[in-house]
Image (cartoon, grey):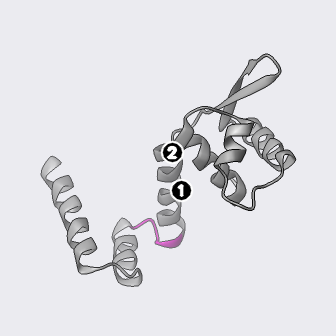
Amino acid sequence: MKLSKAEEELMNLLWRQKKAFMKDLLEAYPEPKPATTTIATLLKRMTDKGFVAYKSLGRSREYYPLVKKKEYFSKHVNGLIKNFFNDSPGQFASFFTQETDLSKEELEDLRKLIDNEIKKR
């Protein structure tokens, strides 16, 4: 199951805060802030999809993520590789390094990450 762009934005706020009341999430948004009803609708949808749960504390709800950020984005990157790069991580890496505007320093950092992964295996 995938989150919409608006849901992902809200989920990122929740991942950062780990748990939060609706007012905390609303305060974390940059200006112009969405309406409270918009946040409530997004939280309801995300709860229905199984991404978020909450604890009732009096009349308030404290929301928390059920899915880890790394797991969510890992599934989507793997789906991207499968759907757009013929299930080839090499094609993805080639595209990524050639089509993004990485500096020489960023490319060297990427090489170090790859070298470290090679040493682990």
Indicate the amino acid at tag 1: His
From the image, give the main secondary structure of the stretch colored magenta.
Answer: loop
Assess whether mark 1 and mark 2 are in contact (beta carbons under 8 angstroms).
no
Task: Mark 2 or mark 1: name the one nearer the start of the chain.
Answer: 2
> Which is closer to the viewer, label 2 or label 1?
2
Q: Nearer the viewer, residue 61 or 92?
A: 61
- The residue at the far top in this view is 58
Residue toward you, 29 or 65: 29
Distance from Cα at disc 2 to Cα at disc 1 = 11 Å
Please identify the quarter of the rendering in which residue 95 is found: bottom left
Q: Is residue 25 visible?
A: yes
Where disc 1 sits, the SS reads: helix
Residue 69 tag number:
2
Q: Residue 71: horizontal and vertical position, in percent?
A: 49, 44
Q: Nearer the viewer, residue 50 or 22?
A: 22
User: Which residue is located at x 83 percent, y 21 percent?
Assistant: 59
Magenta residues, start to end: 84-88
Vertical order, 104 against 55 (above or below): below
Three-letter code for the amino acid on which mark 2 is drawn:
Lys
Which residue is at the far left?
119
> Which residue position is annotated with label 1?
76
Instruction: Locate residue 64: give its quadrant.
Output: top right
Q: Position of residue 51 (x, y in %)?
A: 65, 38
